[in-house]
Amino acid sequence: MKDIAKPAIILLAITAVAAALLGVVESVTKEPIRIATENTQNAAMKASLPDAETFEPVEADLDGTTISSVNLGKDASGNEVGYVITANPSGFGGAVPTTVGIGSDGIITGIQVTTPSETPGLGAKATEPAFQDQFKGMSGELKVNKDGGQVQAITSATITSRAVTSGVNEALTWFEANGGAK
């Protein structure tokens, strides 16, 4: 019994120290991670709706959607210039966070795909301007070219391309269902 007690106590002490260290690391990194995430979200909103100076969260019923947030964009004079809607459709490697800017006229002003868990070199190309910029100026239901649509899919990453397009469509649908173009 004595032979078992000593290693068990040592193992318990090591585990307790490791748990305490993990707790310290988590508490030290929690705020910087929150700030970095917030900065990424703000940059994505600004890039998606460039005419907006400020963004106000909108309370919305998002049940049954992949939409995680809706923000009303206003210019420096306080005039509404559109909405920024973030959706998280499922891609090949998990959620593909897609931030969509929609002007007051219902036209897409830009999209940003942030932190996808897609395959590097393939689906991760959804973060590149060459893919994202093609959505600017579009409206209505969008499809990738392989499905007879106007969105040029990323080579060898059709699932990711469809996911982003799905997120954009979901944002456009929410916009139309909640007042649409004015």
Image (cartoon, grey):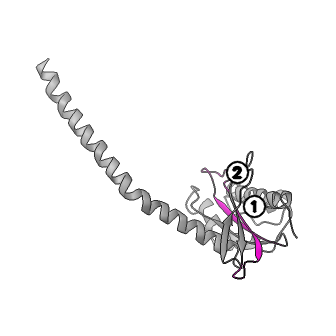
Nearest the viewer among 92 and 55 is: 55
Residue type (three-letter) at the residue carrying disc 2:
Thr
Left or right: residue 38 versus residue 111 is left
**Secondary element at image label 1:** helix
Task: Pick out the residue farthest to the top.
Answer: 1
The image quadrant where one finds the N terminus is: top left
Q: Quadrant of residue 180?
A: bottom right
What residue lies at 77% left-to-right and 75% top-to-bottom? 81
Q: Which mark is residue 66?
A: 2
The answer to whether 177 is drawn above or below residue 21 in the figure is below
Q: Position of residue 96 (x, y in %)?
A: 64, 56
Q: Estimate how packed mark 2 is, as few (under 14), some (14 to 19) or many (20 or more) residues with alpha carbons within 10 Å.
A: some
- Count the marks: 2
Can residue 174 be seen at all in this image of the molecule?
Answer: yes
Q: Which mark is residue 168?
A: 1
Q: Nearer the viewer, mark 1 or mark 2?
A: 2
